[in-house]
Image (tube, coloured by chain):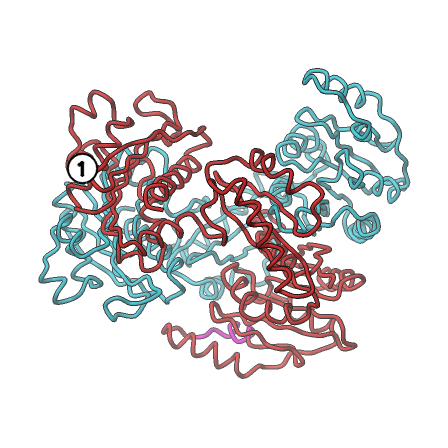
Chain colours: A red, B cyan
Amino acid sequence: MRTAILTVGTEILFGQIVNTNAAWLSQQLNDLGYDVMYHYTVGDNPQRLHDLIELAFRDCDLILTTGGLGPTQDDLTKEVICETMGDHLIVHEPSVRALEERAKARGRVLTENNYKQANMPSRAMVLPNDAGTAPGFALESAEGGKWIMSMPGPPREMTRMFDLQIRPILQKWQDSVIHYRMIRCFGIGESQLETDLLPLIDGQTDPTIATYAKEGECSLRIASKRPTLEEASAAVDEMTAKVSEIVGEYIYSYDNEELVDVVGNLLKEKKISVACAESCTGGLFAGALTEVPGISAVFDRGIVTYSNQAKIDELGVNPATLEAFGAVSMETACEMASGLANVSGCDLCISVTGEAGPESSEGKPVGTIYVGLCYKGETHAVQIPMRNNGRSWNRKYAVLNMMAEIYKAVK
Amino acid sequence: MRTAILTVGTEILFGQIVNTNAAWLSQQLNDLGYDVMYHYTVGDNPQRLHDLIELAFRDCDLILTTGGLGPTQDDLTKEVICETMGDHLIVHEPSVRALEERAKARGRVLTENNYKQANMPSRAMVLPNDAGTAPGFALESAEGGKWIMSMPGPPREMTRMFDLQIRPILQKWQDSVIHYRMIRCFGIGESQLETDLLPLIDGQTDPTIATYAKEGECSLRIASKRPTLEEASAAVDEMTAKVSEIVGEYIYSYDNEELVDVVGNLLKEKKISVACAESCTGGLFAGALTEVPGISAVFDRGIVTYSNQAKIDELGVNPATLEAFGAVSMETACEMASGLANVSGCDLCISVTGEAGPESSEGKPVGTIYVGLCYKGETHAVQIPMRNNGRSWNRKYAVLNMMAEIYKAVK
């Protein structure tokens, strides 16, 4: 089915936010086997919104909209859709009650404009919003055969509404099935990955293999479109086995998991208690690992020793080591990890020290980063092979490498 | 001048890349005083491209396009624009020579399709590309008054071509200037903010005031379009003063800064040394604060005390307190902050403890979060007024509130 994505929001036309909703929805629609023909963005202007809907329906049968469902005066999406689709708004009582309950639970009083969000097209299937105030809806044209599905703009609300309520409908409408698998790799670049897999990629029409670069990692997407899920799934499995033979050593997930989740789950499964000592990453490693639900069963503590004094106080790093080799050194990374093992008694202690930038404090080049690991009484450190891509990138890449070091040690 | 941004590229419709070009161009155009009415994205399909150009010209006089100028067969943007604008392609000799020189300098041989990039509309002003192979162009309609300016898709090439060649033209065309200010608020919802400002918003045409919701915060944009920058800027300042009178207590930045940057810079300016003790946020606070360049001058250490034992070991929290009130309590938050002050000797110590979810460990509702602050020897704690929006959101919102507590204490 031919589809258009229509984003309503002045803040996108002002360039204040990037339209990530359109990209995310495009991925989902393509994965479901829908052809995305257009992205449109328009402000809260009735005439322009109306014209775009008419244009889209010239060669699309489905329009997904995001945004413009809010409580304020300039949120007009619903009104225009109604008029274009030959419907009118009515007060949707269940949505009024949901708004009132939500406000009550939060001890707030609804303002008059809040109630506007509970007005819905009379023929619409209303899509409740359990992550925000504005419900969405799916509405068929008066003549039938053309659909608009409207979701709120905030990505957290939109993705949840799509996943729980719209995806199942779109799945039901399809007569062939796309099955795919995202394989995640670390320690190999995208060009090398593509070169290694060229014999499999060349001349392959189904399954297809595509490579994607992501901050410091890369991924492979193996996809098959067949009449049944069984056939598509078997084709993907067969190709996965071939891929694994060639680049298996770089693969950490066959199921699109994040490295942090793979590592967190390994630590939980194997009941390995863990602690971390961070300098340049400043808590990002601990922050990432503690994003994993249930990690408290094994994660004991993290120490951000930003100053040299903190490294000495908290981890027992030898001042002579800091003096002789500097805070950014293999030696300091080792002492941070082994010192933390003494303090915490954890099975596995990981440390990091480096120059994240923008300026170098000890004269070592920005991007110089060492990771230390103390596991089962053995301590070692490695220098991360990296380039300086700016403070924020350097810090994130250091965290990824810490995860990879743990993965190698405990997998 | 009314403007549309037209992005050509299948990879955007597949959701493989996010359309950052449209956002960047929108910012530039708005800052130049151009009204951006639409973003369109379409694949390399002549009919659909043609229809979109016609639609855009119904109420725009300028279309900026990116992408589709490459050497391959499916790059058709130029051909379609020519046909729509009543022009035809000719071989543009200077572009041929530029391509040949570029290839020679790189020791490459031009393939036949490379030469396609040197074909240009006969009436066009050609825009050389010194960062890539595809030149751009600016073309006026046969009847006059309507313009298309086409740039290549790669952001590095596009931004350079815009800055050096298109911006000067657009500047010359303008007879008015837009000036705006983004004001950032915390502690007030978007509906309430709009309600409070309604007397200013209603009936106001210039300056305009718009409100935006962002995860846990909200923003205000005050914009004015006047003949000179001085007039626009004075109008914005005057409205800013009125806004400040009404909702000033919620405003932390008049210059679109992030709360973490405002807090980090305050701490640096006032030379207030800082340390943090985190439980449920697991290092995210330290990670966020250490994103601020130069923060090492005042940030001493962060301690992630996930387990009760770590709270006792690292911060000297009294086991009796944990026993009597639980780890998630006002009392524990206070002892974490004051304990950290003892350990670190820092001027300001902030702590957090809470139930981030998905499950509650002590029977307190998920979303219950306490922030403790020890500053100048005084310790207090507050419960964050929040709802449970899922683990990841809860943690980020807790970090925002920690920043807000510090802001209130030191501003």
Instruction: Please name whichever residue, A204 or A310, is drawn nearer the observer in this view of the structure.
Output: A204
Residue at the disc numbered 1 = A339
Q: Residues within 10 Å of mark 1 (few under 14, many from 20)?
A: many
Relative to A6, is A281 above or below?
above
Q: Is residue A385 in sight in this rendering?
A: yes
Q: Is residue B147 visible?
A: no
- Range of residues picked out in magenta: A110-117
Q: Quadrant of residue B1?
A: top right
- At which x and y percent is residue B305? 22, 51
Magenta part, dominant SS: helix
- Tell me the residue at 44%/50% (across/down): A258
Q: Is residue B132 left or right of residue B245?
A: right
Pointer 1 indicates a residue of which chain? Answer: A
From the top left corner, tell me how far across and down residue B40 is, in percent.
71, 51
Residue A116, image x, y percentages: 56, 74
Q: Nearer the viewer, residue B234 or B13?
A: B13
Q: Is residue B252 magenta?
A: no
Tag 1: residue type? Gly
